Amino acid sequence: MMGLCGTAAAAGEIRIGSVVSSTGPAAFLGEPEDKTLKLYVEEMNKAGGIIGNTVKLVIYDDGGDADKARTFATRLVEEDKVVAVLGGTTSGTTFAMIPVFEDAEVPFIAFAGAVGIVEPTKTWVFKTPHTDRMACEKIFEDLRKNNLTKVGIISGTDGFGKSMREQCVKVNAKYGIEIVAEETYGPRDSDMTAQLTNLKGAPGIQALINPGMGQGPAIVTRNVRQLGIALPLYQSHGVASKSFIELAGEAAEGVRLPAAALLVADKLPDSDPQKSVATGYKTTYEVATNGQVSTFGGHAFDALFILKAAVERANSTEPAKIRDQIENTKGFIGTAGIFNMTPTDHMGLDLSAFKMLEVKGGDWVLAE
């Protein structure tokens, strides 16, 4: 349930908390986050810690349960006395924890995608992944570029799926895209052919968009091909890992999605400022874990090093001073993009941080 280094706050220590979903239905998101934090905290301590303090990582596994996440968030604040928290694997668990950290005035950098985490801006809450609204906008840009204007949406009913669907509905008109039909599926559904058959028959439909996370998008992808639907299929950054391709198999060929440069780190031009950061993290993670890198671990990497830089600039372990310096993050090159935060922007990424990728030959390639 819990990995803990140390049992009490002490001089010369900086205690950082985390709650992730390293087991349960969102484990494919949370496991790389958990491994990344443990790996790099160990590396930091070998290099002398942060401003002379040994980093103590207190990390809990919520199993994807929002109630457990809130309980662990309270424990981090009241018992573990952490100075900052990283985590919140899913949007649902993240929303459950936000009031705890806002009330306790503890800085929190989230790993989840919903735009509502940072809009409206909350004093103590930040996030590192691109938002679901940005994912919609990047997809709509690509559709417009390819003269596709009529789409169908099949979305998951989980927190991320619902939130991204709402964002797509809010911004589609801005890009001249018409949503001609919509369907949904539950997180435990194992067959979406009925919904996809309805979408297939929608008049004028030219492409499909699937806001979702977990196994659902892989099932949608397989069902699309089984039904012989030849429409372009767009997924979201909620499945931005090699495991999606493995789950969907050959049906994934041609699928497009907006994602961080990390997935194509080796294919970036040498002039790309993210290349050295992305390839460095990818190599370190894959050698240490004997696993494949994913953007989800990258979100944890970005959050940990944004926090480290903030503590160094503050030259303090006081939560309020750390918070102020997180908000002052400028030009930080991470795996998700180049972060420039402000008092009204607690994510700090723009649409240029997203790459449009396509599955070709069982791997991700740049589609632009």
Image (cartoon, rainbow, N blue to C red):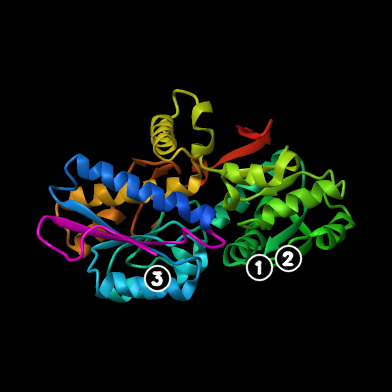
Q: CA distance from mark 3 to mark 1?
A: 21 Å
Kind of residue indicated by mark 3: Ile
Q: Residue under label 2, please give it.
A: 184
**Disc 2 element:** strand
In the image, what residue occupies the spot 73% across and 65% down? 184
Q: What quarter of the picture does the N terminus occupy?
A: bottom left
Task: Specify the segment rendered in magenta.
Answer: 1-26
The residue beneath circle 1 is: 157
84 inside magenta stretch = no
Which of the 4 image quadrants contains residue 157? bottom right
Q: Residue at x 24, y 73 (%)?
A: 79
Q: CA distance from mark 1 to mark 2?
A: 6 Å
Residue 12 colored in magenta in the image: yes
Asked if residue 71 can be seen in this view, the reply is yes
| Label ID, residue 98 | 3
Seen at 40% across and 37% down, the residue is 281
